[in-house]
Amino acid sequence: MGSSIAYVNGTYLQASGSGSTPSTNMTGVNFLRAAMAHYIANGEAADRPTDNLGNVYASKFYAYNPTGLYLSYWYKESPTVSSSMVFTQGAGPQYATLAVDGWSGVAASSAVETTYTANGNSSTTSLQPGSLTPVNDGALLAFVAFQGDGPASSAGSGFSFHTNAAGIGGVA
């Protein structure tokens, strides 16, 4: 069994249009997880997030609803990191939020095995997207949630938010 997974640091950005996060110390991180939530008037999703060290992020999923909300999950296994990382959301989004979490002890490959999705509306009080049992040692259990005007998000027993920006959260 590998080392235990630990949250290292996180940052976020809320903007209308493109923008960058404050400089963030990600020293010791071996897995970066980025979540983007944004509205697009013309129906096109934003570009992938980038950082000042040139890491290329893989996309695990995009979710879209008819009101124009996009929610996307991005990650980088074994990234190049530093004590002064800056993350930039892709060009084009309106009312965008980008949240980035850094983790240590995550598997060097196959850390993102699968995803489940669940949708609700402003009156939804609970979402349960399904059961998830990791196959590989060192797989991170994480979720991304977005809500515009609904009640505050929370995580179930044994889980906690790490980077919480306008409803985008990560759990360990």
Image (cartoon, rainbow, N blue to C red):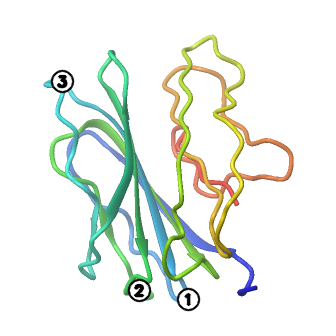
> So how many labels did they put on this image?
3
Q: Residue at x 44, y 83 (%)?
A: 78
Figure check: 131 above or below 51: above
State the residue position of label 1: 28
Report helix, strand or loop for mark 2: loop
Q: Which mark is residue 41?
A: 3
Q: Residue at x 51, y 82 (%)?
A: 108
Q: Is residue 1 left or right of residue 42?
A: right
How far apart are the two marked residues, 2 and 1, measured between alpha carbons? 8 Å
Q: Which three-letter amino acid code belongs to the residue tagged 3?
A: Ala
Q: Residue at x 40, y 82 (%)?
A: 79
Q: Which three-letter amino acid code belongs to the residue tagged 1?
A: Gly
Q: Are the residues flagged by discs 2 and 1 in contact, CB closer than 8 Å? A: yes
Q: Is residue 152 left or right of residue 107?
A: right
Q: Residues within 10 Å of mark 2 (few under 14, many from 20)?
A: many
Label 2 vs 3, first from the N-terminus: 3
Residue 169's spot in the image, x, y percent?
58, 48
Residue 97's spot in the image, x, y percent?
39, 44
State the residue position of label 2: 81
